[in-house]
Image (cartoon, rainbow, N blue to C red):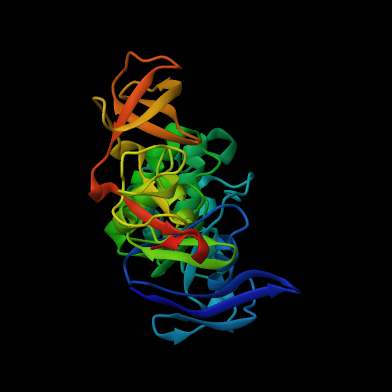
Amino acid sequence: MSAISVQHLSRWWGATRAVDDISFEAAAGKMLVLLGPSGCGKSTTLRLIAGLEAATSGRILIGGVDVTHLPPAERRLSMVFQSYALFPHLSVAENIVFGLRVRNVPRLERAARLGRTAELLGLGALLDRKPSQLSGGQQQRVALGRAIIAETAVCLMDEPLSNLDAQLRHDMRREIRGIQQKLGITMVYVTHDQTEAMSMADQVILLRDGRVEQDAPPAELYARPASVFAARFIGTPPMNILSLADSPGGAVIAGTAGPVVLPGRGAGLSLGVRPEDIRLGPAGGLGATVTAVEYLGADSILSCAAGTQSLAVRVPGRVDLSPGATVHLYWSKDAVHIFDPERGGERA
């Protein structure tokens, strides 16, 4: 197993800072997910680790060895891309062992590794088929098999599930995570999908504009977001961010007469509360008007207006409410997050 250490890494193209002085550690045998919106630098970071891009500055260590200036072939890692990149004229077996053949691995060793990999991925019955005869999920398994058969301690994955439908993505998330844990591979996985990050990762690096917004385990990323950006990137619907105003009794939601939601002064600050932490109750809570209702089966999402601000509420099951209805909203003080817009939305 090999830990990965990224130290003050940057990649610039002229004035464009695709990756801007980022540092993080991927523990040996663990799964680290690089998460963020399009253009945040996550795929560039992965390509820098792989050696497919040259760093402008900074260092990359794998297993304690500085690989910053080594070519990809000398970094002892495997990679799975968004495109499966399977050779259409080769069988499944030939696609999986292709890299071993190029490296002149002996035939008996290739056969032994192929057997282990096919058994692990459930590809035994498909080895003689061509890629055109496979489903999307099966093609993804072949691409994964090509990385696993290399038996490297580090595997990099660049949005490998983005071409699959929702059910296949769900199945492959569990499969990839199970394989990573079983083999003890150090895996760095790129995605824009918060569900993949939260369900698969040991550690999440949330990127924004080429910089690290937050480095935390999934549970901490959800429970204690470092900024408004982090708070709203994780969660469906995203966290409600409400401006505060001062009143004689304490801070209230701006545009409303109360109730007090925070002791002391609140003007200039923002209050965050997740939709699932809000409950409906009797008069006395934050008065709001329902503007839309979405029934999702297990729960419903209410879109509400409180004064001049909008917020979402997630409630269990089906609710007998229509747009225009008045509701009263409550949440516990433990569910409250305070952010400071003057400090870039950082946690206050």
74 sits left or right of 170 in the view: right
Residue 293 occupies which quadrant of the picture?
A: top left
181 sits left or right of 208 in the view: left
Foreground of the two, 220 or 279: 279
Whether 253 is drawn above or below 59: the answer is: above
Residue 121 visible in the picture? no
Q: Position of residue 227 (x, y in %)?
A: 44, 59
Q: Position of residue 165 (x, y in %)?
A: 50, 33
Residue 194 visible in the picture? yes
Q: Quadrant of the N terminus?
A: bottom left
Residue displayed at 50% across by 66% down = 343
Q: Quadrant of the C terminus?
A: bottom left
Residue 340 occupies which quadrant of the picture?
A: bottom left
Q: Position of residue 274 (x, y in %)?
A: 35, 42
Whether 190 is drawn above or below 288: the answer is: below
Q: Position of residue 99 (x, y in %)?
A: 54, 63
Residue displayed at 51% across by 34% down = 135
Residue displayed at 57% across by 61% down = 43
